[in-house]
Amino acid sequence: MYFPPMETERLNLVNVSRKHTNFILKHFSDRRVCEFLYDEEDLENYDQAHALVEWFANPEEKGYNRWVMESKEMGGIPVGTCGFHLWDRQNRTAEIGYDLYPDFWGKGLMKEALVACINSGFQNMGLNRIHAYVAVENQRSSDLLKRLGFTCEGIFRDKHYYKGTYYDHYTYSLLRREW
């Protein structure tokens, strides 16, 4: 399996399914979660959340995924998501993405989840390079990637056009040999 369920000390990471639709709506309609996500509009209704869940369905077949991070300490409630997309199998690269509900910021949960994701990417997907794009204003995300050993390669200028404005993003990468 490329995208198996995973377990960390405090989290279960499971692929998005229909049971997560209400969480996906709550999560991706929260302005704090979406503050630096310039690639998609914030969700506004259940149908949009359902469409996003369906888009992530069958990850093994599609070659991209999103794990829902479920808190073990809180009875399995979802607290965020993470996963891979833009998998280039020939060149063994993929982009990692992640987001965490604000009530859980600053507790080390995202770092814990990303360690599992990165391990899975290198082991299960056979990746050589994992990259991430971070809005230049998103200092917390940049700091997290640096703590995980990612290297900032520079700025991808005008990466996203969102609501009439272009946004620059830092480009980060982590190579298998650096992990």
Image (cartoon, rainbow, N blue to C red):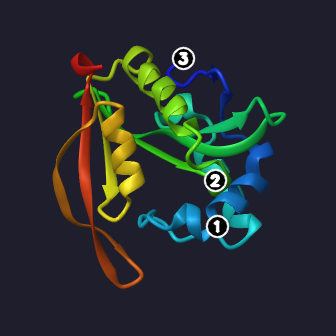
Q: Nearer the viewer, mark 2 or mark 3?
A: 2
Identity of the residue drawn at 64% across and 67% down:
30
* Side of 68 where 131 appears, left or right: left
Number of the label disc, if any, that sits on residue 1: 3
What residue type is disc 2 on? Tyr
Q: For residue 22, what is the image quadrant?
A: bottom right
Number of the label disc, if any, that sits on residue 30: 1
* Side of 21 where 112 appears, left or right: left
Count of numbered tags? 3
Identity of the residue drawn at 36% across and 31% down:
148
- Rendered-image quadrant of the N terminus: top right
- Residue located farthest toward the left when viewing the structure as drawn: 154
Q: Secondary structure at mark 2?
A: loop
Calculate the distance from the C-alpha at mark 1 to the C-alpha at mark 3: 32 Å
Calculate the distance from the C-alpha at mark 1 to the C-alpha at mark 2: 8 Å
Counting from the top left corner in percent of width and height, residue 34 is at 53, 64
Q: Are marks 1 and 2 in contact (CB under 8 Å)?
A: yes
Instruction: Give 141 or 159, whichever is nearer the viewer.
Output: 141
Q: Nearer the viewer, mark 1 or mark 3?
A: 1
Identity of the residue drawn at 23% across and 21% down:
178
- Residue located farthest toward the right when viewing the structure as drawn: 75
Give the residue number, with chain letter if any, for mark 2.
Answer: 101
What residue type is disc 3 on? Met
What residue type is disc 1 on? Asp
